[in-house]
Image (cartoon, rainbow, N blue to C red):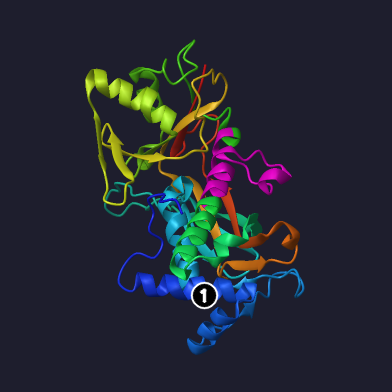
Amino acid sequence: MRNIGIEPFAGPGGEQRAEKVGHWMKSVLGHPASREFCAKHNMALTKATNEAGNTAGGFLVPTAMDNAIIAVRDSVGAFRMGADVRTYRSDNAVRPRRTGGLTANFVQEGAAIPVSAMNFDAVSVAIKALKIFSQSSGELWEDEAVDLANFIVTEIGYAFAAAEDDAGFNGDGTSAYWGIQGLGPKMAGLKSAVTAASGHNTYGLLDNIDLTNLMAGVLATGIQNAKWYVSAMGYAQTLARLAGNGGGLVAYQRADGTIRANYLGFPVVFTSKLPNVQTTLSGKMMMAFGDLSQSSVIADNSSNTAIDISADRYSIEDQVAVRGVRRLDIVNHSLGDASTYGPVAVLYGA
């Protein structure tokens, strides 16, 4: 199995947790030895209540597996790293949003104090089902339980993270994105939508003025916790190229193989869902800068991941089907308007 740099069962007792998860998955598939293992360790197969009937519904995964999937997703999901993540119990919820605050005034002795108010409106979330369906060789499921758990959990975590990034950055409000509107499409025409200089439509043509204009497009309160959101291509051909000429870039490799980088003092967060090409990006979102925790919320349903594993559907091909379900919503809610900056700015190619 491939090593992709993330250790889903990190920490003390990680191998034992992975072993239990591997046997739990095999027991769902019907392996007698794994079912005995799960019975011995009091690991029940519990049907998810928020899915369809018995044949279609998934099983709620053990806590160790759910935590491992979340650990992978949180480690590689760029949008989730920056957004405000909230947990909701219901499928429809309203989150209060601050729209105005108190005002302090210098007032003469005995004069009336002007009245100010804390103003709020609401951000509505509607939980949606994010699903994975895949086929894998039956031979994979004969592997040792620890390796099987590490591989499957990592793949599921990566898939969830990629889908969240795609919706959060690129969602166009259609059914393909569950109705979610991403930063790129939603910010077009707003004051924090920054267009690069004329002709600057590839990462190799962007310059420092384009990037500092992007930074200047962020509301002052969004600077303190701001991050760069960029693809590997954008990082290499823009940030690394400009740093090679004038400095400003610091990067090093962590022990787990991932990269920690910052540019001009602000962290760089990598995502494969922003453009990763050398060709023209005229009119398209190239990168973003700012504080996603002020502009965007990921609403997680409180229930665990649901997994269904079956060898019946594709038995003639010796394939095992895996279906995973996680329930969430993504709302980009505070982006400013045509005359007011927001906490996040987006750079579009000219």
Question: In the structure shown, which secondary structural element does the residue marked by tag 1 occupy?
Answer: helix
Amino acid marked by disc 1 = His
Image location (x, y in percent) of residue 317:
72, 56
Residue sitting at the far top: 199
* Region in magenta: 161-184
* Rendering quarter of residue 229: top left
Pick the front one: 102 or 338: 338
Image location (x, y in percent) of residue 93:
62, 63
Image location (x, y in percent) of residue 98:
48, 53
Query: Could one spot residue 192 in this view of the protein?
Result: no
Asked if residue 341 is positioned above or below residue 162 in the image, the reply reads above
At 31% from the left and 26% from the top, the residue drawn is 240
Asked if residue 66 is positioned above or below residue 1 in the image, the reply reads below
Magenta stretch, overall SS: helix
Image location (x, y in percent) of residue 115:
43, 53
Q: Which residue is mark 1?
A: 23
Looking at the image, residue 316 sits to the left or right of residue 267; the answer is right
Pick the front one: 167 or 13: 13
Q: Is residue 165 magenta?
A: yes
